[in-house]
Amino acid sequence: MCRENLPVLLTRDRPLTLQAKLFRGLSDYSRLSILQALRAGPLTVGEIVAATGLSQPNASNHLRCLSDCCLVASEQRGRFVQYRLSDPSIDRLLAMADEVLAGAEQGLNDCRCTETTGQCRLGRIARSDFSRRLGQN
């Protein structure tokens, strides 16, 4: 079972550490598009490629990652492997994300967080402006 593969974290921050890993895994556009496609039900790699527009090698690599993280389960069906969400709570999490987006879409559109560093440029600009104002007083 996947839970046996999780490293044992002996700190009180274990839930936050695991949540950060979960959200880091969900933060990739390709992985998220695969999970969204799988919300409709089990799909083969070819069907995932058709639904997401990803290349077959790219989809396979991301499926491996999602499988290693226990977010996706697979089952051999003849010559094909079908992938599905490993737990119904993943579908609920994605549905809740849609609900949050309904109320926060404008803020997220305006957000200037950089994808490479994860740092919010908007926050840096505000801090810089604040510091400049302090110097002027």
Image (cartoon, rainbow, N blue to C red):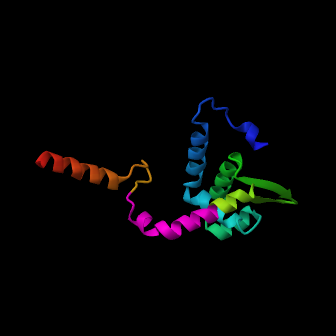
**Residue drawn at (55%, 55%), measured in percent from left and top?**
28
- The picture places residue 134, in percent across and down from the top left corner, at 17, 47
Q: Note whether residue 34 is visible.
A: no
What stretch of residues is rendered in magenta?
Answer: 94-112
Report the side of 110 relative to 87 (left or right): left
Q: Quadrant of residue 20?
A: top right
Report the side of 15 relative to 72 (left or right): left
**Residue drawn at (54%, 64%), measured in percent from left and top?**
100
Above or below 110: residue 121:
above
Question: In this view, which residue lies farthest toward the top?
Answer: 10
- The picture places residue 98, in percent across and down from the top left corner, at 58, 67
- The picture places residue 4, in percent across and down from the top left corner, at 75, 37
- Closest to the observer: 51 or 87? 87
Helix, strand or loop: magenta stretch = helix
**Residue drawn at (66%, 49%), measured in percent from left and top?**
65
Q: Note whether residue 15 is visible.
A: yes
Instruction: Indicate the quadrant containing the N terminus: top left, top right, bottom left or bottom right.
Output: top right
Residue 111 highlighted magenta (yes or no)? yes
Report the side of 42 relative to 137 (left or right): right
**Residue drawn at (68%, 46%), measured in percent from left and top?**
69
The total number of labels drawn is 0
